């Protein structure tokens, strides 16, 4: 591929203090059976030899471009790579992870079959079972109307398992927010998805249950940058949280309705939803107590907490919030949420264990 040709894939790799691991990631690109790609590897002010590794690969193969910048965190590193990208499709790959050798070829074929749709796939651990290159599972299809349902699935907000359209990302101005101490992946994807469906209202998100990306535990919390951002023990905006309980009820009701009820979700997604929405209803209780607000009418009924706990009971889904929410113990709900946000999570796990024993330890747990 000459320098003036537009590649099909742009792979953005943020890297911080990955001198010993980055080569494995970049080698997985060189091993791809599909060759029409470029890789923008961003050295985010690493104090070790990460920058030299970036330059080595850029000198070895013109498809690699090395960017060196001052340390600013993973969001700013990804933004730098995004802005330098040229490809029709865009993928984010962390520098201590790697792709299956057939990943780009497999994705290119699915893009040929579904040129207007956003492709989503699975991650696996190094010890997980690799998929066969010719395995093409039937995708789950999420239209614009089911966008919120996709966000609620366990894979919905995973940045690394998506292929984005480069022109939509670049031209829309959707970028990662460097000010976010966490959750920057989900924030980026949700804003991108909103723009995606504005550009392509008849398109879909296709979720393929095939692992193409290998996520490793080697680098832990320093995956792309060790930059620390100070934040409150509970990261919330009091003014933005006013009326949150009512908004959450509306969102939850629309989400369940869009899938024809809880039965529209597969078991793994039901478990994930149970935990996420239990936690969010608990935050609504906690925030209302902090703000001195009354919970809205129907909050404990079928359109809110009651509907959630009934679905959890029916499907035998358990998490630490189940009993406090089911019994409407507002003080305990708020205390468990406070503990969930703490470092020790001591009360959270005590409540979890007691509740699990009460259910005979036979329910599906998360």
Image: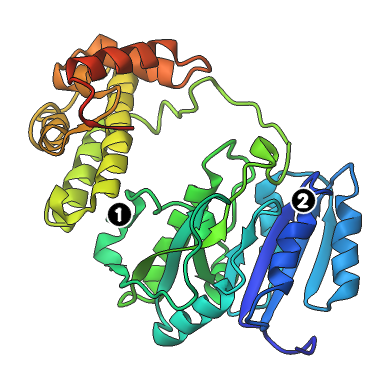
- The x, y position of residue 322, in whole percent, is 22, 24
Local crowd size for mark 1, using a 10 Å CA cut-off: few (<14), some (14–19), many (≥20): many
- Label 1 sits on residue: 148
- Going 91% across and 56% down the picture, which residue do you hit? 52
Nearest to the observer: residue 74 or residue 121: 121
Q: Residue at x 50, y 27 (%)?
A: 235
* Residue 291 in view in this figure: no
Pick the front one: 200 or 113: 113
- Under tag 2, what secondary structure? loop
Q: Quadrant of the C terminus?
A: top left
Task: Answer with left or right where residue 148 lies relative to residue 30.
Answer: left
Q: Position of residue 71 (x, y in %)?
A: 80, 44
Residue 297: give x, y in percent of width and height: 11, 28
Distance from the alpha carbon under mark 1 to that under mark 2: 36 Å
Tell me which residue sits at (31%, 34%) in the image: 275
Q: Position of residue 123 (x, y in %)?
A: 50, 56
Say whether residue 342 is left or right of residue 16: left
Q: Is residue 314 left or right of residue 158?
A: left
Q: Is residue 319 above or below residue 112?
A: above
Task: Please name the residue shown 67% across and 58% down the image.
Answer: 79
Task: Say which quarter of the image contains residue 1.
Answer: bottom right
Residue picked out by circle 2 = 21
37 and 146: which is toward the camera: 37
Which of disc 2 and disc 1 is earlier in sequence?
A: 2
Local crowd at mark 2 within 10 Å, few (<14), some, or many (≥20)? some
Observer-side mark, 1 or 2, equals 2
Note whether 9 is above or below 327 in the view shown. below
User: In screen coordinates, is 9 left or right of 70?
Assistant: left
Residue 336 visible from this viewpoint: yes
């Amino acid at each position: 591929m000459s320098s003036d040709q537009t590649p099909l894939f742009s792979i953005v790799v943020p890297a911080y203090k990955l001198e010993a691991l980055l080569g494995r990631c970049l080698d997985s690109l060189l091993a791809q059976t599909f060759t029409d790609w470029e890789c923008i590897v961003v050295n985010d002010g690493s104090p070790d030899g990460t920058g030299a590794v970036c330059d080595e690969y850029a000198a070895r193969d013109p498809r690699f471009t090395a960017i060196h910048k001052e340390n600013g965190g993973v969001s700013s590193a990804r933004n730098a790579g995004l802005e330098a990208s040229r490809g029709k499709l865009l993928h984010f790959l962390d520098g201590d992870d790697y792709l299956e050798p057939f990943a780009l070829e497999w994705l290119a074929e699915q893009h040929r079959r579904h040129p207007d749709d956003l492709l989503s796939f699975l991650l696996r651990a190094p010890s997980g079972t690799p998929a066969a290159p010719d395995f093409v599972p039937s995708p789950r299809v999420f239209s614009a109307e089911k966008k919120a349902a996709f966000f609620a699935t366990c894979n919905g907000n995973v940045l690394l398992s998506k292929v984005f359209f480069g022109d939509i990302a670049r031209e829309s101005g959707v970028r990662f927010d460097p000010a976010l101490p966490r959750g920057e992946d989900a924030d980026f994807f949700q804003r991108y998805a909103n723009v995606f469906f504005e550009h392509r209202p008849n398109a879909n998100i296709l979720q393929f249950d095939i692992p193409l990306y290998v996520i490793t535990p080697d680098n832990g919390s320093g995956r792309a940058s060790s930059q620390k951002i100070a934040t409150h023990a509970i990261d919330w905006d009091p003014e933005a949280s006013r009326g949150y309980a009512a908004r959450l009820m509306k969102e939850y009701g629309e989400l369940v309705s869009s899938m024809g009820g809880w039965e529209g979700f597969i078991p793994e997604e039901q478990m994930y939803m149970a935990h996420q929405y239990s936690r969010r209803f608990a935050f609504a209780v906690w925030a209302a107590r902090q703000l001195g607000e009354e919970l809205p009418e129907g909050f404990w009924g079928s359109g809110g907490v009651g509907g959630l706990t009934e679905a959890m009971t029916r499907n035998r889904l358990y998490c630490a919030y189940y009993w406090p929410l089911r019994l409407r113990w507002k003080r305990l709900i708020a205390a468990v949420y406070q503990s969930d946000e703490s470092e020790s999570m001591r009360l959270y796990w005590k409540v979890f264990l007691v509740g699990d024993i009460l259910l005979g330890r036979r329910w599906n747990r998360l």
